[in-house]
């Protein structure tokens, strides 16, 4: 059975031995907030593999002459960098998703009551069968039409044109020119 990087598994004596430190040093680092292990019943400290790695990093910095306050600041900044990297990765994924949909022109449909929906037009050379001018929901990477804004908000703009799609009775279909 493998344990995760962040799973608390080591008691203080084992973590101290793995980090080549005295257990009292680990208690001091806990009080200073440098390495804060998770607590089990009875307030017993449990260290993860990540905590042991951080302890080794702190020990190396200390040997290089960095003060405890400097080490605390370095550890804090490393945590912020890791959080920012996760945020950047998440935003990059969102950008890729938006770019995937941006390849297809959007098609708007307005109902008789002023409700507006949009779909993504795959064009005449689409790889999937179905109604021309629409993207079918339920297939990977495709979304069902979603409501947008009232039809009155889109009165000005590009020319309205008829699409080969068969809109429902009473629905005006508008496709912006590229």
Image (tube, rainbow, N blue to C red):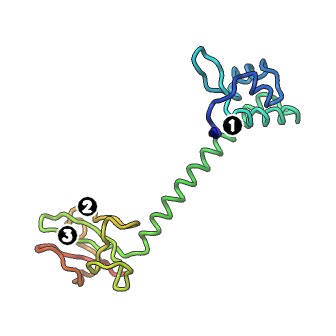
User: In this view of the protein, which residue sits in the foreground, 169 or 40?
Assistant: 40
Placement of 94 over or under 162, stated as above or below: above
Q: Is mark 1 on a helix, strand or loop?
A: helix
User: In this view of the protein, which residue sits in the foreground, 112 or 129?
Assistant: 129
Where residue 33 sits, quadrant-wise, is top right
Q: Earlier in the sequence, mark 1 or mark 2?
A: 1
Which residue appears at 64% of the width and 40% of the height?
2
User: In this view of the protein, which residue sits in the foreground, 112 or 133?
Assistant: 133
Q: Is mark 3 on a helix, strand or loop?
A: strand
Placement of 19 over or under 93, stated as above or below: above
Placement of 101 over or under 162, stated as above or below: above
Q: Which of marks 3 and 1 is nearer the N terminus?
A: 1
Q: Is mark 2 on a helix, strand or loop?
A: strand
* Image quarter of the C terminus: bottom left
Query: CA–CA distance between discs 3 and 2?
Result: 10 Å
- Rendered location of residue 127, percent (x, y): 39, 80
User: How packed is label 2: few (under 14 Cα within 10 Å), some, or many (20 or more)?
Assistant: some
Asked if the residue at tag 1 contacts the one at tag 3, i.e. Cβ–Cβ closer than 8 Å, the answer is: no
Farthest-out residue, top: 42
- Asked if residue 149 lies left or right of residue 143, the reply is left
- Asked if residue 106 lies left or right of residue 19, the reply is left
Asked if the residue at tag 2 contacts the one at tag 1, i.e. Cβ–Cβ closer than 8 Å, the answer is: no
Query: CA–CA distance between discs 3 and 1?
Result: 55 Å
Q: Residue 24 carries which label?
A: none
> Which residue bears the numbered disc 2?
147
> Which residue bears the numbered disc 1?
50
> Which residue bears the numbered disc 3?
110
């Amino acid at each position: 059975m493998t344990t995760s990087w962040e799973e608390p598994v080591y008691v203080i004596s084992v973590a101290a031995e793995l980090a080549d430190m005295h257990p009292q040093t680990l208690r001091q680092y806990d009080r200073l907030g440098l390495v804060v292990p998770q607590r089990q019943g009875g307030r017993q400290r449990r260290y993860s593999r990540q905590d042991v790695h951080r302890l080794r990093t702190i020990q190396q910095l200390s040997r290089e002459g960095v003060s405890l306050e400097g080490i605390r600041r370095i550890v804090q900044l490393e945590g912020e960098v890791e959080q920012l990297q996760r945020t950047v990765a998440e935003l990059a994924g969102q950008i890729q998703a938006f770019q995937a949909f941006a390849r297809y022109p959007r098609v708007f449909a307005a109902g008789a009551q002023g409700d507006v929906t949009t779909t993504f037009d795959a064009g005449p050379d689409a790889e999937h069968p179905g109604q021309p001018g629409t993207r079918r929901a339920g297939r990977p990477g495709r979304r069902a039409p979603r409501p947008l804004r009232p039809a009155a908000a889109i009165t000005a703009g590009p020319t309205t044109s008829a699409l080969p799609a068969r809109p429902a009775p009473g629905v005006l279909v508008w496709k912006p020119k590229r």
